Amino acid sequence: MAMLRIAYSDIDRATYERLVDELEIATDHPLGLIMHGAAEVDGHVAIAQVWDSAEYAKAFGDTRLASTLARLGIAPAREAVVFELTDLITP
């Protein structure tokens, strides 16, 4: 499993909500996505995701996410870091 941490420099809450609506990840779950969470930090959105593998995360980022960002005129994330998970506990 892999955890993906994404930080955008120019996405506020309203832009994030528009992006998520366009991606439809709440209803059309990307293959391999286990968890998606977002928080507003200093006026910008930070995202954390857990995926079955780093390959699933990359495939989603390279295809569906990239095309949606381009269509909406949103710059790519300033930082995207993948961590291999050694443990995930869900109640």
Image: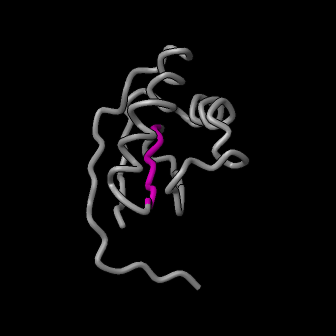
Quadrant occupied by the C terminus: bottom right
Colour scheme of the rendered structure: one colour
- Rendered residue at 57%/35% (across/down): 16
Q: Does the stretch in magenta take in 54? A: no
Front-lying residue, 83 or 42? 83
Q: Is residue 85 left or right of residue 24?
A: left
- Rendered residue at 41%/37% (across/down): 61
Front-lying residue, 88 or 13? 88
Q: What is the span of residues highlighted in magenta in the rendered image? A: 44-51
Quadrant occupied by the N terminus: bottom left
Location of residue 71 with respect to 5 vertically, above or below: above
Front-lying residue, 84 or 32? 32
Front-lying residue, 71 or 10? 71
Q: How many marks overall? A: 0
- Rendered residue at 56%/17% (across/down): 72
- Rendered residue at 47%/83% (across/down): 89
Location of residue 87 with respect to 15 vertically, above or below: below
Location of residue 38 with respect to 74 vertically, above or below: below
Percent from the top left, x then y, of residue 87? 35, 80
Report the magenta stretch's main SS: strand
